Amino acid sequence: MLCNNCYRKCNVDRTLKTGFCKIDDKIYVSAICIHKGEEPVIVGKSGICNVFFDHCNLQCIYCQNYQISCNNVDISNNLISADKCVEKIKQLLDSGTKMLGLVSPTPYVDNIYEIVNKLNSDNYFPRIVYNTNAYDTVEIIKKLKDIVDIYLPDYKYGSYDLCKSLSNAPDYPDTALEAIKEMYKQKGRKIILDEDNLAVSGLIIRHLVLPGHVENSKSALFNIAFEISNKVNISLMSQYYPVYKSFEYPELSRKLTAEEYNEVLDYMSELGLENGWIQEVESSDCYKPDFTTTEVFK
């Protein structure tokens, strides 16, 4: 099968060669672990079992997970079979979490089907959280309709200049929006909660405010409000901190200021986007993953 999971449209047979993300048809995972840094309706008290897949179909120069998302990183030691991946997931599900998060999942959609089917065959039915950069084709999101319970996409850019220079994806504002529209079509604006206030089904759109680029955030929020709905749940993040190649850009070589974040918050309120979550500006000190020290299940 030729891979066209994202808008790179590499159209390659990954059993024979790799495309933009430099991943063949196998599974490469940097970490399978309990994570408590997601939104409250996802992590609850027990956290979420997150599977951190290697490499990424975007290459954002400021990626907080750059240690595993950079496509030049050697991932050969992170090769894992579907059976072993499932066994490690089951160990963590047995600890009490109801949620299974798939992080940077787009290149691995076929593998995800295999993993979920094996879990179900073993009588494990976690709620599947599709944690994506939203650079997914509409066709892939339609394919996921029957297995994904909660969509957790980023919507990174409203600016065409920024998405090209910072993520090498000049069509991102339009294509990601189309993917999220399909997620909204499947899940609607309301998050369905269980008796423990954990999400059973829904859509949460994340947006990270970048320092020096308040107008990009305003454009992104405008697109969401007027192209999808101003009642959808937004997670507006202030956790940016400079890493990786961001130091090559003066405006990205610092943390976000309270003034910048509050300006975006005010605009979000003007748009009527009142459902969701916000962060303390100081949160950048709390979200610094280090995959060289994270316990990795192999």
Image: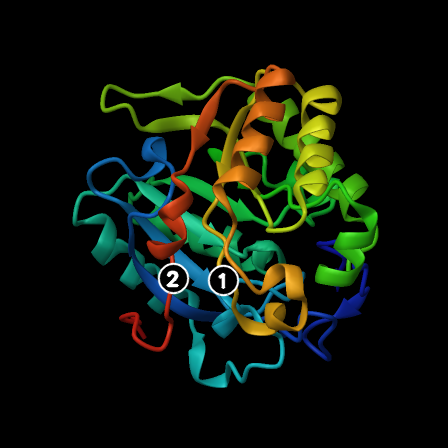
Q: Residue at x 74, y 34 (%)?
A: 219
| Label pair 1/2, CB-CB below 8 angstroms | yes
Residue 243 image point, x, y percent? 52, 68
Q: Residue furthest front?
A: 259
Q: Residue at x 20, y 38 (%)?
A: 45
Residue 288 is tagged as: 2
At numbered mark 1, what does the secondary structure look like: helix, strand or loop?
loop
Q: Amino acid at mark 1?
A: Gln
In the rendered structure, the answer to whether residue 63 lies left or right of residue 271 reads left
Q: Nearer the viewer, residue 159 or 11?
A: 159
Tag 2 or tag 1, which sits nearer the N-term?
A: 1
Residue 64 is tagged as: 1
In the rendered structure, the answer to whether residue 118 lies left or right of residue 95 reads right
Q: Nearer the viewer, residue 162 or 282?
A: 282
Q: Residue at x 59, y 40 (%)?
A: 144
Q: Amino acid at mark 2?
A: Lys
Measured along the vertical axis of the image, is residue 45 above or below residue 22? above
Q: Residue at x 71, y 54 (%)?
A: 5
Residue 3 image point, x, y percent? 74, 61
Q: Residue furthest left?
A: 95
Q: Nearer the viewer, residue 50 or 290?
A: 290
